[in-house]
């Protein structure tokens, strides 16, 4: 009987998930325009790429000011195929190819605006190799290389500021993950998808409905929190009651993550979309050499406030003290009259809400896409491990370190390797101090 | 609706290259997770090391085919040592995070543009499979029963692949019956009890990690030889998670569990795909509900759902024994 009930509830939960996300489904229908390219996930679907189709070569032409350059003529040729296209208002262009193979992409330098020229004229035409189902980027940097013109100190300051911003965003998610781990022992692999959920909700309200971004972010916070509640009510609390082991729960969270990720892909498509910032939030402010959008400043303030609120709650309120007690020892906490299940429910709501908010911020830094959270998940793990699993304040410190490390590593490493530095730190920390920076020494081996 | 076509595609998938590759990968995971209780979430890295070891030594270093195979195997052993030394003393969830991070590091590094001349960057490497297909003894033609047939190239790789699968199963079967296997399973059940009997738990775990990793490298060989190309982004975290789904589906800690799991997994996946596509083109399902591109996404949603439901309601999988495998942290 119990199994049947559990099955029914699980079904109800899944329906609830679908119902919650339905607005977003209509979102992609309403806005149209950004329907999925035919094979958006060539990289992510092991073994299926061969059946692919939908090869695309695309890019964005940006001027020295970082703005897209419209009306530049691009020609793609290869093996009897030839197509000419022009960049749109944002400088983007895209050519669908008949199949895999070698293509040459030519940018017509005559069509560039007055005064603009290619940084590497010898890399025009550009030879690209496109494999099955792949979306290949072909980029033509314009203008003098900016790298030498900016001084080392200025670059140091700019990357440190970006690192701080990224670190704060990671911290929101890491604190939530850490609270959940502390109270339930679950390593939640679906935490990244909670970030994506937040970003998509904010995208729906701000871009589709045209609400102000800050209101949309608030909606993301609230709805993500509600989703966290539903998730614990419909899934995790049932599993705890059944006595499901921690490893089993961890694998369930992986299944949930895969399910949610492809569901997001289904409703949102494989493309990337910018959050609509509006005039005020999109403005660039300069503090000496450091340039930020108002959006970045506002989101950093929101992060600090949110983390401050959580810290205050943990240290000063009854519920916060109860949470720390449950983290410390659930059985003992329960014996002193703390309603452990209720504390865990609250932790799920707070954790999911923070993750949703973090997703919105992340969507402001990198563009919104269905795999946004997945890309951040390992960095969040790194932050949490660095600070010490299950210690909320440790994960704050860990997240700031990871954020700074990721952004500042571009000073010495190629930008494409910037995540590697953070992941390497994760492994090194586990080697020399497995309990993390603020973790207590206990047996973890 | 062309049911014949759906049936043929489904059957082909059940014995196809993907089933072989994932069966081998899951056999490796079975040694790690099913028998030893090691939560290796970086199996994709072992496949990638095998694949890149083979491809790089043939195309870049210009070595003969068999040296490439040896290089891939040595690579897998080295990776297992590299991963195992820091992590095997840690608790299971730490091991999971470290292995998944290591796998991602490997993928990000080989796809980097700065090492392009050695690894081919994001495009990968091609042109190393000629020697392998030159060994093909099968004359030209199609092999199989009725419509479920493959050309001589595909048949050759499938033949080699399935021989590898059955040899691997044999090795696992013999090892798990041996005293070594009893110690390994003892570690899964109670590490401290085994340690108190004077066994070197760390050493046994390391041997298990290496063995499973070598099976992973074999999977990598079959994968890249079948496609005659290596590409870094195939070796992402999802490959590992799908292999876990297969392992749990078939039944962990069972010799043939991963093989049956892989076959069923790919048959279900391809059946869903073929069925939905046929239903859409025949007008049974309106394209406004499911578009052609959404088919791929729906079946992976099903994978996620299946993984959750399996672990919750039937953690022992199809053939597993519940007493043999209690998924839990110790």
Image (cartoon, coloured by chain):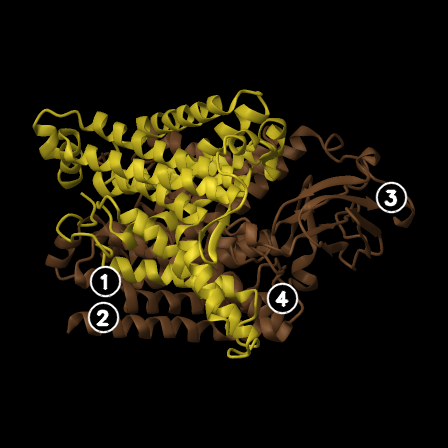
Q: Disc number at residue A6?
A: 2
Q: Are marks 4 and 3 in contact (CB under 8 Å)?
A: no
For the residues tagged 4 and 3, is the chain the same?
A: yes
Q: Position of residue A57 (x, y in %)?
A: 70, 50
Subunit bearing disc 2: A
Most extreme residue toward the left, as rendered? B197
Specify few, some or many for label 2: CA neighbours under 10 Å numbering under 14, 14-19, or 20 or more. Answer: some
Sequence-wise first label, 2 or 4: 2
Q: CA distance from mark 1 to mark 3?
A: 63 Å
Q: Judging from the image, what is the letter of the chain drawn in brown?
A: A
Q: Which residue is mark 1?
A: B313
Q: Judging from the image, what is the letter of the chain drawn in yellow?
A: B
Q: CA distance from mark 1 to mark 2?
A: 9 Å
Subunit bearing disc 3: A
Specify few, some or many for label 4: CA neighbours under 10 Å numbering under 14, 14-19, or 20 or more. Answer: some
**A222 relative to B68, above or below:** below
Q: Which residue is mark 4?
A: A35
Q: CA distance from mark 2 to mark 3?
A: 64 Å
> Is residue A217 visible in the rendered structure shown here?
no
For the residues tagged 1 and 3, is the chain the same?
A: no
Q: Are marks 4 and 1 in contact (CB under 8 Å)?
A: no
Task: Give the residue at x 47% y 35%.
Answer: B105
Q: Secondary structure at mark 2?
A: helix
Is A242 placed left or right of A27 in the picture?
left
Q: Which residue is mark 3?
A: A116
């Amino acid at each position: 009987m119990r199994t049947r009930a559990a099955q029914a509830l699980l079904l109800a939960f899944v329906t609830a998930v679908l119902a919650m996300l339905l607005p977003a489904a209509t979102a992609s229908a309403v806005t149209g325009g950004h329907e999925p390219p035919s094979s958006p996930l060539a990289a992510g679907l092991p073994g299926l790429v061969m059946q692919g189709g939908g090869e695309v070569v695309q890019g964005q032409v940006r001027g020295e000011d970082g703005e897209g350059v419209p009306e530049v003529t691009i020609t793609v040729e290869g093996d009897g195929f030839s197509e000419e296209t022009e960049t749109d208002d944002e400088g983007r262009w895209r050519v669908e190819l008949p199949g895999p193979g070698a293509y040459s992409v030519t940018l017509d330098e005559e069509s560039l605006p007055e005064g603009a020229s290619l940084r590497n004229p010898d890399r025009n035409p550009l030879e690209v190799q496109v494999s099955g189902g792949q979306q290949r980027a072909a980029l033509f940097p314009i203008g003098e290389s900016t790298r030498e013109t900016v001084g080392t100190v200025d670059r140091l300051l700019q990357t440190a500021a970006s690192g701080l911003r990224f670190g704060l965003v990671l911290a929101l998610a890491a604190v939530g993950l850490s609270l959940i781990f502390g109270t339930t022992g679950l390593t939640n692999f679906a935490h990244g998808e909670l970030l994506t959920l937040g970003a998509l909700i904010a995208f729906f309200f701000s871009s589709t409905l045209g609400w102000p971004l800050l209101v949309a972010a608030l909606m993301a916070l609230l709805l993500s929190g509600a989703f966290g509640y539903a998730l614990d009510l419909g899934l995790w609390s049932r599993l705890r009651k059944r006595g499901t082991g921690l490893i089993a729960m961890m694998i369930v969270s992986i299944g949930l993550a895969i399910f949610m990720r492809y569901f997001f892909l289904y409703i949102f498509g494989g493309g990337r979309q910018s959050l609509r910032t509006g005039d005020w939030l999109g403005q660039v402010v300069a503090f000496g050499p450091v340039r930020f959008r108002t959006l970045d400043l506002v989101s950093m303030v929101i992060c600090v406030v949110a983390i401050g609120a959580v810290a205050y709650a943990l240290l000063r309120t009854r519920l916060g003290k109860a949470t720390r007690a449950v983290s410390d020892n659930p059985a003992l906490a329960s014996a002193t009259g703390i309603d452990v299940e209720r504390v865990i429910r609250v932790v799920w709501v707070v954790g999911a809400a923070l993750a949703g908010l973090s997703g919105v911020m992340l969507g402001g830094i990198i563009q919104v896409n269905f795999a946004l959270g997945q890309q951040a998940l390992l960095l969040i793990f790194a932050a949490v491990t660095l600070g010490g699993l299950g210690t909320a304040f440790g994960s704050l410190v860990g997240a700031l370190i990871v954020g700074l490390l990721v952004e500042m590593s571009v000073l010495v490493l190629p930008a494409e390797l910037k995540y590697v530095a953070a992941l390497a730190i994760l492994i090194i920390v586990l080697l020399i101090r497995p309990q993390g920076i603020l973790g207590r020494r206990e047996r973890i081996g | 609706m062309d049911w014949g076509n759906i049936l043929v595609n489904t059957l082909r998938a059940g014995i196809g290259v993907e089933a072989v590759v994932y069966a081998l990968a899951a056999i490796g995971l079975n040694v790690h997770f099913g028998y030893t209780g090691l939560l290796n979430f970086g199996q994709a890295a072992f496949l990638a090391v095998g694949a890149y070891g083979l491809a790089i030594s043939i195309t870049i270093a210009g070595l003969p085919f068999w040296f490439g195979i040896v290089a891939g195997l040595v690579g897998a052993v080295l990776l297992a040592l590299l991963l195992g030394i820091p992590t095997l003393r840690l608790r299971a969830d730490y091991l999971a995070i470290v292995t998944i991070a290591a796998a991602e590091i490997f993928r990000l590094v080989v796809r980097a543009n700065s090492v392009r001349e050695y690894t081919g960057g994001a495009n990968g490497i091609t042109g190393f499979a000629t020697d392998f297909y030159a060994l093909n003894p099968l004359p030209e033609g199609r092999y199989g029963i009725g419509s479920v047939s493959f050309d001589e190239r595909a048949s050759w790789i499938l033949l080699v692949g399935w021989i590898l699968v059955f040899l691997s199963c044999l090795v696992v079967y013999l090892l798990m019956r041996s005293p070594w296997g009893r110690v390994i399973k003892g570690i899964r059940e109670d590490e401290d009890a085994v340690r108190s009997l004077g066994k070197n738990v760390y050493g046994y775990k390391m041997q298990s990690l290496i063995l499973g990793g070598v099976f992973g490298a074999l999977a990598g060989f079959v994968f890249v030889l079948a496609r005659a190309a290596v590409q870094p982004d195939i070796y992402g975290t999802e490959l590992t998670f799908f292999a876990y789904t297969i392992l749990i589906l078939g039944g962990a800690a069972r010799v043939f569990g991963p093989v049956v799991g892989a076959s069923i997994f790919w048959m279900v996946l391809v059946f869903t795909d073929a069925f939905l596509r046929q239903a859409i083109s025949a007008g049974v399902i309106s394209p406004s509900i499911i578009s052609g591109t959404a088919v791929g996404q729906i079946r992976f949603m099903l994978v996620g759902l299946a993984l959750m439901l399996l672990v919750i309601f039937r953690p022992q999988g199809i053939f597993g024994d519940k007493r043999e495998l209690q998924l839990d942290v110790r």
